[in-house]
Image: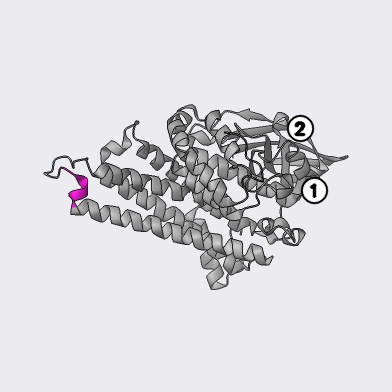
Amino acid sequence: MTTPSVATIETGDEVLARIRELLPLIKKNAAEGDRNRRVPDETINALKEAGAFRLATPRRYGGYENLRAMLDAPALIAEADGGTAWVVMISNTNVWIAAAHGGDLADEMFADGPDTIIGGVLAASGKARKVSGGYRVTGRWPYASASLHADWTAGGVYVVDDNDQILDQGLVSFPAADVRIEDTWYVSGMRASGSNTIIAEDVFVPEHRYGSLLPVLTGSYVADHPDSPLYRAAIGGLFVTSATAPQLGLGRAALNMVIEKAAAKPIAYTTIERQGDSVAFQLLIAEAALKIDTAQLHATRAADDLQRYAELGVFPDVLARSRIHGDSAVVVRNINDAINILLNANGSGSFAEVNALQRIWRDSNIAARHATILPQVSLETYGKALLGVQEHITPLL
């Protein structure tokens, strides 16, 4: 397979079609990625060639600037492997941040082509001190997904003075060579995501690689992109919608697996020789399928809201932004519930190491606990907005 040019892939649908062709390869490599705690290079390279890492890259660098494909691609990839989907999702989200920042940073990041992989952590886990021409940065960023494949890494920092008083909060970007990776990602799910700890030790970061975060959270960047709707999307809504996207694919994968097995799998200690003949099993399948459908409907509504406001060039009001967070909670809870129902229906064999269902269950439950999409936080955020409460508990609104 040759690397596609902008001329050969012009729409998100074409990228998704190429990714769909890769699903057997991704599925074949999924167990290896889980076992080695790293997405195999064969998978990463194939997805690069398909254009999966350039969905948020600006067109002027050879990218596609396609918001809907940013959300649909991880969901599709997760039908074959959750860890791979997470890496693609995280990279495209971080690419979006870099592109929205623009200027010399984007020129530098995409100097070698549109398929730059960017990992990182938005939380301020480092300190930056102003020096001539930039900042000296020291920090540790745990849970830095895509760390093992990233060309660049972004890290949240507090800008402090000589007395450690906080002056600002922002994001710095490092080439991979400027940081080191500490192998810390020993977890039960999303093992292939490579979410290790990134460490910077007194690294010089030029001025153009720093961006203040607080103005961005209020939509200050929207007016900077009159010709690029993608980079006018509400940042908090984009984050939560992106992070829930892999859940959709995991739910679909689990449903398809259980249905496929139902034609030949008996129900132990009963007279039922085929699960599919059991009314109780049929009810469980229907309930799980409808929960997955419910999740998809809310994910679609959130994506539609993001797209509509972005195309209008309007930063959504608090209620509209909060509803996107509420939608993400519905996605997470319904997919997790559906997968639990499906494993109940399929039986204890679901948890055999050779059964991909247990990996789906692990990946979905770990991803559901990501800080940006905790359902209780998202629901409280939406509830406060509905009631007109001014004080919110997350800056990512």
Vertical order, 137 against 300 (above or below): above
Q: Quadrant of the N terminus?
A: top right
Q: Secondary structure at mark 2?
A: strand
Relative image position of residue 274 (x, y in whole percent): 18, 44
Q: Which residues are magenta?
A: 273-278
Q: Secondary structure at mark 1?
A: helix
Vertical order, 309 against 26 (above or below): below
Quadrant of the image occupied by residue 45: top right
Q: Quadrant of the C terminus?
A: bottom right
Q: Is residue 274 magenta?
A: yes
Vertical order, 323 against 166 (above or below): below
Relative image position of residue 163 (x, y in whole percent): 79, 43
Front-most of residues 312 and 100:
312
Q: Is residue 67 magenta?
A: no
Amino acid type of the residue that numbered disc 1 sits on in the rendered structure: Gly
255 left or right of 392 in image: left
Relative image position of residue 250 (x, y in whole percent): 42, 46
Residue at the far right: name it.
132
Q: Which mark is residue 202?
A: 2
Whether residue 62 appears in this view of the structure is yes
313 left or right of 323 in image: right
Look at discs 2 and 1 and give the one toward the viewer.
Answer: 1
